[in-house]
Image (cartoon, helix red, strand yellow):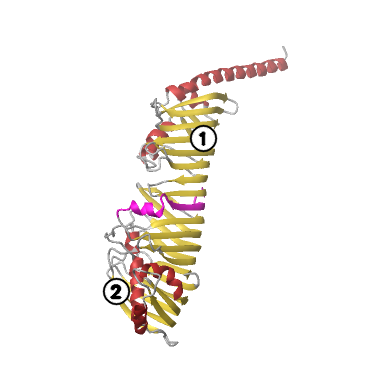
């Protein structure tokens, strides 16, 4: 027999041997996989599939129509996690680990169209955050250990068994999680795995954190140290009347919408079991915020901390170098009851820039928080404010100064008429204030240049009719013209501890106007 025939026979024999080994291993692995997925599955969930294919040449495993459900599923109701997955592909698995260690060790897992529903008691998203790593992450790594996870077109629903209503709904989830490491050490951390980089995109997010509000997001996209949100909103669950009826104490009702927000160069996670968040900048565009307060509920007499203390008392490291709010709108409404309608203050074309926002956690020294605001007050008067404070100052000292130009006081009618039973006419050519304060007291000065100020007061029992005698007396007392020269006043005001910073500021302004005008 010639050497060529021997080589040919050897190659053919080797090829046949490889084919037979491949067929044998395929058969054996297909028999082994169900044991790993079913018999050696130590999670709290059963995993079933319609079809599974194994290729030793490409070292891929593909499964279609996977169903996941609790092992101890109640017969008459649903409780726990249920999932249907269109297909799963495990790429470049390790044959040795699968054959002899009963674990699917692979480079990547691709999960297509997973639909996950979690039925749970109560109205909290998670009753115990540790259950994620103990019931999902830790058992999962004993079945499949991969470096990369890719999820395409996923959806998650969390439904309360008590109300049969959604707590969380997320659609069109795209996730890329690469460079994953899960060890006994990482499982002890708050985030039970490490990763090198990630990308997450979600559409149509709904979240109800409590009985009073729900959040919704049109789209969220985040990658490593960048995040962008489109069409974000915080909306009350009830009408104002119903909301107020449910309040034990006086409280603001918020309605917030924004077109987009971006967080740049962010870093977050846990260090020594302590959460931290840092960002170079947060930019919010076209915020539409409404703050409504009704005076029917009992007063909340608890102490209201100033912003120095509120930031200082945050119990984790927080740092935002720059916060910007651009081209936005803020409306404040206050109502005594539901008969007269609310008094309204409008701040349009609202722009804010805040520097050096930090929590006080772990800090011994820090620069001042600096806030600059520019907007239109009551539609047509320019308002500018500069506000500084230091979070580590235990006296909660602050300095705030600002000015308003060409203010037609008749624009205050929507606030003063229902709330004070009074209207004004005239023009504030320029009002400037400069106040220094702390948690106990404030001092400062203000100046006002104004023309043709007149006051009209209305009857309490018949608010549509003018109280002419009262109006005449007040107009005698009020100096209706500054005669083209600014009039000045010094003020000193004690802080009411159960009132907010904005109440404190307003009382300083009101005291200065009272001294100037009367």
Give how far apart the Cα atoms at labels 1 and 2 are. Answer: 61 Å
Residue 112 drawn at (x, y percent): 55, 35
Return the x and y of residue 141 as percentages of the image width and height.
Answer: 44, 32
Query: Residue at coordinates 50% horizontally, 72% vertically from top-left?
Result: 380
Please say if 418 is above or below 199: below
Q: Secondary structure at mark 2?
A: strand
Image x and y of residue 14, in percent: 63, 18
**Which residue is drawn at the image coordinates 33% and 72% (left, top)?**
507
Residue tagged 2: 493
The one nearer the camera, 374 or 241, is 241
Q: Give the residues drawn in magenta, as a range.
A: 222-248
In the displayed structure image, the side of residue 120 where residue 98 appears, left or right = right
Relative depth, front residue between 217 and 150: 217
Q: Is residue 125 visible?
A: yes
Q: Count the numbered circles shown.
A: 2
Q: Is residue 398 visible?
A: no
Residue at coordinates 42% horizontally, 46% vertically from top-left? 208
Residue drawn at (38%, 27%) of the image: 74
Mark 1 and mark 2 lie on one chain; the one further toward the N terminus is: 1
């Amino acid at each position: 027999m010639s050497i060529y025939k021997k080589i040919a026979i050897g190659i053919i024999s080797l090829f046949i041997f490889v084919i037979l080994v491949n067929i044998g291993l395929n058969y054996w692995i297909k028999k082994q996989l169900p044991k790993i997925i079913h018999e050696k599955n130590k999670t709290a969930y059963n995993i079933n599939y319609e079809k599974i294919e194994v290729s030793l040449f490409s070292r891929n495993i593909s499964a279609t129509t996977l169903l996941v459900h609790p092992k101890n599923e109640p017969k008459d109701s649903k409780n726990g996690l249920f999932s249907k997955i269109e297909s799963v592909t495990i790429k470049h698995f390790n044959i040795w680990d699968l054959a002899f260690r009963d674990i699917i060790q692979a480079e990547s897992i691709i999960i297509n169209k997973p639909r996950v529903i979690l039925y749970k008691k109560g109205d909290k998203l998670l009753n115990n955050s540790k259950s994620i790593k103990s019931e999902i992450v830790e058992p999962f790594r004993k079945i499949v250990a991969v470096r990369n996870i890719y999820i395409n077109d996923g959806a998650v629903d969390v439904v309360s068994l008590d109300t049969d209503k959604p707590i969380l709904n997320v659609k069109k989830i795209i996730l890329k999680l690469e460079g994953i490491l899960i060890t006994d050490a990482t499982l002890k951390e708050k985030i039970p795995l490490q990763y090198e980089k990630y990308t997450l995109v979600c559409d149509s997010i709904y979240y109800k954190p409590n009985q009073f509000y729900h959040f919704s997001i049109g789209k969220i996209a985040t990658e490593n140290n960048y995040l962008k949100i489109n069409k974000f909103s915080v909306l009350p669950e009830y009408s104002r009347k119903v909301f107020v009826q449910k309040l034990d104490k006086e409280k603001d009702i918020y309605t917030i919408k924004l077109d987009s927000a971006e967080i740049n160069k962010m870093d977050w996670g846990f260090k020594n079991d302590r959460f931290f968040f840092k960002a170079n900048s947060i930019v919010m565009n076209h915020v539409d915020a409404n703050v409504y307060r009704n005076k029917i509920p009992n007063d909340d007499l608890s102490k209201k901390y100033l912003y120095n203390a509120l930031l200082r008392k945050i119990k984790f490291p927080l740092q935002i170098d720059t916060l910007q709010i651009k081209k936005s709108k803020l409306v404040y409404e206050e109502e005594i009851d539901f008969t007269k309608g609310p008094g309204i203050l409008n701040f349009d074309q609202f722009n804010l820039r805040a520097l050096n926002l930090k929590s006080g956690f772990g800090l011994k020294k820090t620069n001042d928080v600096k806030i600059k605001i520019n907007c239109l007050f009551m539609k047509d008067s320019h308002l500018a404010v500069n506000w500084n404070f230091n979070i580590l100052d235990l006296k909660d000292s602050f300095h705030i100064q600002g000015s308003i130009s060409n203010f037609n006081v008749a624009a205050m009618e929507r606030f003063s008429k229902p709330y004070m039973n009074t209207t004004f006419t005239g023009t504030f050519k320029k009002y400037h204030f400069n106040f220094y304060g702390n948690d106990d007291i404030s001092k400062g000065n203000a100046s006002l240049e104004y023309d043709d100020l007149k006051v009209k007061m209305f009857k309490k029992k018949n608010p549509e009719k003018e109280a002419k005698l009262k109006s005449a007396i007040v107009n005698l007392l009020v100096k209706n013209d500054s005669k083209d020269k600014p009039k000045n006043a010094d003020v000193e005001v004690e802080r009411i501890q159960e009132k907010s910073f904005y109440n404190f500021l307003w009382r300083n302004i009101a005291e200065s106007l009272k001294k100037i005008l009367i």
